[in-house]
Image: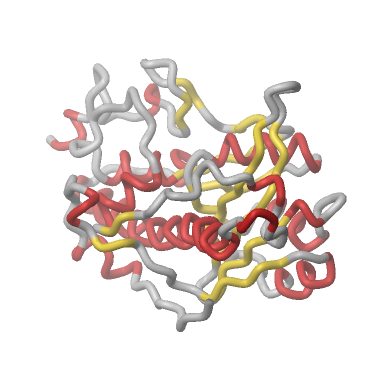
Amino acid sequence: MNTQPQRFAPDDAATKMKLGNPKSESLKAYEQQQTIILIGDVDEANNHLRSIGSNSVIGFDSEFKQSVKDKRGKVCTVQLTTHDNTYVVDMTRFDGCPAELRRILEDPTIVKAGTGLHCDGKIISECFSIDVKNCQDLGCMIRIAFPIHYQDTTSPLSLQQMVADVLHRDLKKDNRMADWELGLRDDREGRPLDSMLLYAALDAQAGLELHYQLVAAIAMTAQQRKVDIPIDWYTYDCYKGKAARMETDIHNKIVVWSWALCPWYVGGKFSNFWK
């Protein structure tokens, strides 16, 4: 499952971006971008993940099993995407968290880009006592970059929707309900391990590609509209299982930026932003 990595051009992304709401059946499928590496032991994890240094930007996602009994989640996989590789760490193979993975998650200089990371961070914190730092929320970023297109802040934006709107690709979700608790090496009963591995990897890959597009779009939007868009508005830490530096908006939804500090969001709309 190898491919040559695609190099993204964040400086050119905003000028090429055309948002839309196409039907998924009219879109081509989102395809693998980077080489996928499945990691299943401590030595593998530490050797491979050592290549992710400080000041990196990575796509980040995880799959977990929610326990109905104690309402706690169990981390099953952690996915990290760089320009060249996607590392899918099968956490069911470990008693704890590999040292290099812990280092990456706790490094405040490494950007982790994804959706719903406050949820992932909470479960990772509960399982391994890790504070996941420098999470950049793609849902917040796309609302800030394109406020008119995403004025409705009452419902969350899925990664699948954002990939369709921005990248014009259909991110398949066929294995959303797979039994991740068995890991990615247990092939009992004909489990679709290859498709599960690809499913896990594509979310992190799409997250990284979206991040570069949205960073460029936010920069261009701020320049065109002559407004300040602090990075803190879409960045937070998951500290002891809780998202730090997050605020509640007028709909009581958890967001990163504070409405009170935003001079161009008034009365539940971004209207002043465009004057």
Point 81% across, 59% down: residue: 98
Name the image quarter holding residue 26. bottom left
As rendered, which of 151 and 75 lies closer to the eye? 75
Q: Is residue 57 visible?
A: no
Left or right of 255: which side holds 62?
right
Point 35% across, 27% down: residue: 155
Q: Is residue 95 above or below residue 53?
A: above
Quarter of the rendering occupied by the C terminus: top left
Left or right of 174: which side holds 77?
right
Q: Is residue 49 above or below residue 172?
A: below
Name the image quarter holding residue 243. top right
User: In the orientation shown, which residue stands out farthest toward the front?
Assistant: 189
Point 50% across, 49% down: residue: 175
Picture mark count: 0
Q: Is residue 197 above or below residue 268?
A: below
- Where does the image place residue 82, in percent across and percent down from the top left? 55, 69
